[in-house]
Amino acid sequence: MKENKFLENDNKFYIEVKPIIRYPKCYISGKEQDCLNCELQKNNLCDSPFGKCMVKYPGHNKGCPNYGKKANCPPNIPGFDQIFDMSKPIYAIYSIFNLKQHVEKMRDRHPNWTDKQCRCSLYWQGTAKKQLRINCVEFMEQFKEKEYILVEAPESFGVDVTETMKKEGILLEWPPMNDVYKINFAGVLREDIKNNEYVNGRKKWINEKGYLILEQR
């Protein structure tokens, strides 16, 4: 039976999941991932989370600025199942931020603001991320004897987080209108990965908080 457990209150959860991993066609065919020059990507036809980094969003017409620069970011990052032992339980640790309530408060404080201003992530992102960090600390404390390693932004490892959570009855809104979920994953490293210093040419290390870090080449 899967474990779906409250940590302390209604805003702290972890749940066992079966990650849905989607590899891009370039990766499957043995090519190196190159979203900057990929026709599928340019036409928004790549269904892999690996390629979603380059989808345009407000203020970033070329997609995420961390692509190819930040640790744990594509391209050519190994898939989740290439790093973690899928025969052992995988957990999603998450927090929920009540965006609807936040927007209502902002409207009361700033009656002249637009809906976009009231929803601006600058005013709530830090709070939501802080709650997730607290949840992850508590998770690691409970699982400290089981060799669990945390992954921030599991979608960068090819996990379709939306569909994975949907299977467990948790519906993520895009764009979020009512609730914002912040989600990290946790798993046990595969035996062939544990003692390797490099994975796919990237230096591997675990930081002091238990997060997997794969440095850019």
Image (cartoon, rainbow, N blue to C red):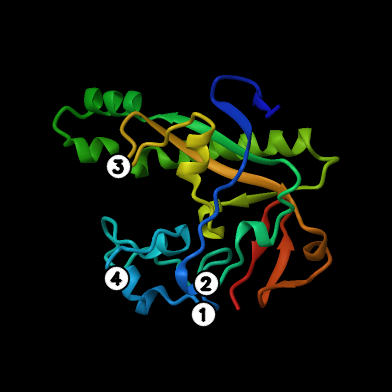
The residues bearing labels 4 and 2 have C-alpha atoms spaced at a distance of: 17 Å
Instruction: Work out which residue is located at the far front of the displayed protein and give it.
Output: 29
- Whichever of callouts 4 and 2 sits on the residue coming sooner in the sequence is 2
Q: Which residue is mark 1?
A: 31
| Circle 4 SS class | helix
Which mark is on residue 57?
Answer: none
Identify the amino acid type marked 2: Tyr
Give SS at disc 2. Answer: helix
Name the residue beneath numbered marker 4: 42
Amino acid type for the residue under numbered disc 1: Lys
- Res. 153 visible in picture: no
Give the vertical position of 103 relative to 80 (above or below): above
Q: Residue at x 61, y 66 (%)?
A: 78
- Which of the pair 11/49 is nearer the observer? 49
Query: Could you tell which of marks 4 and 1 lies nearer the N-terminus?
Result: 1
* SS state under label 3: loop
Is there a contact, CB below 8 Å, between mark 1 and mark 2? yes
Residue located beneath label 2 in the image: 27
